[in-house]
Image: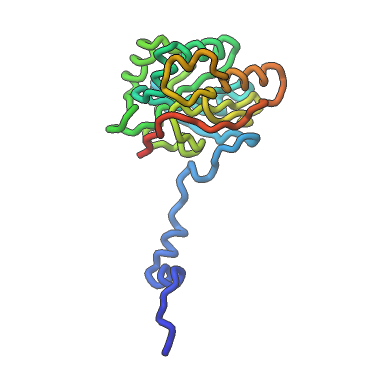
Amino acid sequence: MSDRRLTRRTFLAATGLGVLAKSVPAPAWAAAVAKVGTPAPAFTSTATTGKAVSLGDFRGQTVVLEWTNHDCPYVRKHYETGNMQALQKEATGTGVVWMTIISSPPGTQGYATAAEADALTAKRKANPSLVLLDPKGDVGRMYGATNTPHMYVVDKSGTLAYAGAIDDRPTTRKSDVDGAHNYVRAALADLAAGQPVKTPITRAYGCTVKFS
């Protein structure tokens, strides 16, 4: 008796799905996944101003990427205490480019239109250089953003120098902001001093990014 068991390969070949799978291009974010110590994945996204913004536009400058969700209690902890705004102002005051990125799609927690995002920035007196809208999650997936806030620092050469949490207090308690070790501030200080980042990778904490 012949062996009638179908392997996955023979099934795909028989149905033609194997050819289809090979012909469908992989999504753009699948081609590059962020890894500390390697070039930060290039991307182009739309700012709340309607302008297309590329990471490459800021080559030669240090860049901070901040994934956010304004309804997330972990994010609110840092904004309602003024911690995030202070860090943004401190960083941009030294020439750092700060991009706040919203990867929540319509109908999910944290989604905001351009007008809503700008209103939030004004209401919270936030100080990012730009707010980028990523409702399809392409940039978020490219960088492996898992939580809000999830923080990344790209150095002047375009290398990803830091990825992870904003600090070492993974709670929603506002009182924990005081006394916390801020990894982003430390990473920026190391780079400003011409030194490698002492703690380049940490585990991000917060609400999960609401990808579509």
Q: Looking at the image, which residue is at 70% across and 26% down?
A: 196
In the rendering, at what x and y percent does residue 4 appear? 40, 81
Residue at figure coordinates x 43%, y 54% from the top left: 24
Would residue 71 be found to the left or right of residue 86 on screen?
left
Asked if one can make out residue 185 in the rendered structure from this viewpoint, the answer is yes
Residue at 32%, 29% (x, y): give it.
Answer: 109
Which one is in front, 201 or 53? 201
User: Which image quarter is the C terminus in?
Assistant: top left
Number of on-image labels: 0
Q: Is residue 102 left or right of residue 157?
A: left
Residue 35 percent location from the top left of the image: 59, 38
Residue 72 % position (x, y): 37, 25
Q: Residue at x 50, y 45 (%)?
A: 30
Q: Quadrant of residue 112?
A: top left
Looking at the image, residue 125 lies above or below residue 56: above
Question: Where is residue 201 shown, x and y percent of the image?
Answer: 60, 32
Question: In terms of image quadrants, where is residue 187?
Answer: top right
> Looking at the image, which residue sits at the far left?
107
- Looking at the image, the residue that sits furthest to the bottom is 1
Screen quadrant of the N terminus: bottom left
Coloring applied to the structure: rainbow
Any part of residue 51 in sight = no
